[in-house]
Image (cartoon, rainbow, N blue to C red):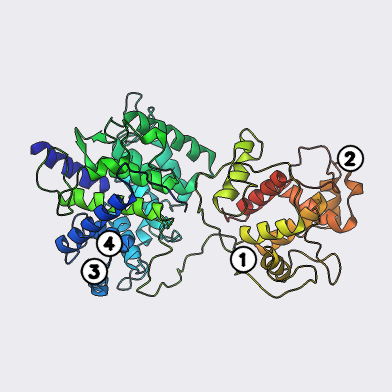
Amino acid sequence: MKKQIRRCFALVLALAFALTPCVPATAAGAAALDAAAARAAAYMLGAVKAPEVGSVGGEWAVIGLARSGYDVPEAYYANYYKTVEDYVKENQGILHEKKYTEYSRVILGLTAAGYDPRDVAGYDLTAALGDFERTVWQGINGPIWALIALDSMDYPIPENKGAKTRATRDLYIAEILRRQTSDGGWNLTAGADGEVGANEKGDPDLTGMAIQALAKYQDKPEVKAATDKALVFLSDLQDNKGGYTGWGSVNSESVVQVLTALCELGISAGDSRFVKNGNTLVDNILSFQNADGSFKHTAEGSGNSQMSSEQAFYGLVAAQRSLSGKNSLYRMSDTVRRGEFVPSGAPGPGLPGKNADVKQTAVTKPGATFADVAGHADKTAIEALAARGILGGKSDSSFDPDATVTRAEFAAIITRGLGLPEKTAAAFEDVPEGRWYAKSVATAYAYGIVAGVSVAEFNPGGTITRQEAAVMVARAAKLAGMDTGMDATAIRDTLAQFGDYRTAAEWSRGSLAFCYSQGILDDSVLDVKPQEPISRAEIAEMLYRLLDKAKLL
């Protein structure tokens, strides 16, 4: 009993506040998963009739119910919001002086319930997470849950005027990566005093949580490498019943964190790396469930643990959502909005001078890749754009990086890359309504990114040359807020290093010079080759570099 009390205390500290389908194969099948989740939801609604602000009997129950799709009375969420509002008023917007995971947990609870955490009784609860040093003071939990909370609805990190170091997503990512242990995992204390000790060992709970936070950033090579190492660690650590030992006991909470991590990554629970002796992660969770829908902390234990029940419930919900192809547990853009989501005063992604319609494209397919780009020079760019649904492969496993790009394909790629709202007005006779590229061409034309080959024709099947690509990318860059203007001297000086630059059409030289000056085109090559067809890989690299320069990644 004392061991369980110590574990519960440690987990409360560890949790603190405590799209891409993942197909959770289970030996029992989807029907058993649905039945278990329904029992858990019914239990939760009865056990937590009036959720409070808290790590047990509070936000986790709300998140599980809201994300489950279970039939919950609207008054349940309205009463929860009123409870939070009263709590925030009473505490004058300060949820905790030091444990900033309190803010992260409540942000997730409110977002799942359909309310905006940026205006609760006049307080912006995301503001606290704009202070990097205060957020990470608590330990690895701070940056992990700050990222999960902020990314749940792509909330911008607000400017916290009292912060010594203003937080950014990159700072939080770097802090998580810094604290990875040599075996590939994470634990609660490694790196707290500076360097991570050579003998530090990861644990399944914190490793799962860290992966959940990093899942959205798999296009970053350093994040992908850390994640891959962590997955090997978790696979090796899994026991022959499909579960995990954490904090001294085989328990339900540890397997929940690993399952949720896989679903956030888009990895099937039936992945061979995570099936031991025929048992999946979902099978293991189900082994802890009581007849009333609650869950035990350990398989040998009796009764139920409310903390275990809440975590196991949302783990099953994560598996259910993934099986049905819905947004993952923590990607909440699909939540039912019960309150008004007001625009934030902080600037969102992008440059200050961008067109208001230009939007950052979110990662929806983390981990997307293709067999034929392994080792390719443009692999990072291809995977980053594929993860955001900006471009796809010729098949699930093939990208065909050396293939040429048609004008129609380019229009689709560039408009998705800039997140532009679709236009439908037909502009060209050879782009009939109903063709897959019609709206993309109409959108690219409406925003001045592309033009026709004549007044009436677009030539959608025509091949894009390098000089044409440069012109269109430069137009997109201007729309994204970049200064594309260069005088004649600057254009000449930039292009003079290339022996064949005079073969480029006059109308393209300014755009080519801009792309080279901004690193959108690689100036280490010897020739421009302006009239040669550009490849799919080259277009991916150009757009990736443009979006990076425009702060839209």
Can residue 131 be seen here? The reply is no
Q: Amino acid at mark 1?
A: Leu
SS state under label 1: loop
SS state under label 3: helix
Left/right of residue 159 with respect to residue 136 in the rendered view: right
N-terminal label among 3 and 4: 4
Marks 3 and 4, how far apart at CA? 12 Å
Along the line of sight, the residue nearer the viewer: 327 or 138? 327
Along the line of sight, the residue nearer the viewer: 107 or 494? 107
Marks 1 and 2, how far apart at CA? 37 Å
On residue 65, the disc is 4
Check the picture and name the quadrant holding the N terminus: top left
Q: Amino acid at mark 4?
A: Leu
* Above or below, comparing residue 273 to residue 444 in the picture: above
N-terminal label among 3 and 2: 3
Marks 2 and 4, how far apart at CA? 65 Å
Is label 1 in contact with label 2 (beta carbons under 8 Å)? Answer: no
* Above or below, comparing residue 281 to residue 422 in the picture: above
SS state under label 4: helix
Q: Determine which residue is flagged by label 2.
A: 499
* Above or below, comparing residue 84 to residue 101 in the picture: below
Residue 314 locus on image (x, y percent)? 29, 53
On residue 420, the disc is 1
N-terminal label among 2 and 4: 4
- Neighbour tally class for label 1: few under 14, some 14-19, many 20 plus, Cα within 10 Å: many
At a point 35% along the width and 53% down the height, the residue shown is 320
Left/right of residue 455 with respect to residue 435 in the rendered view: right
On residue 80, the disc is 3
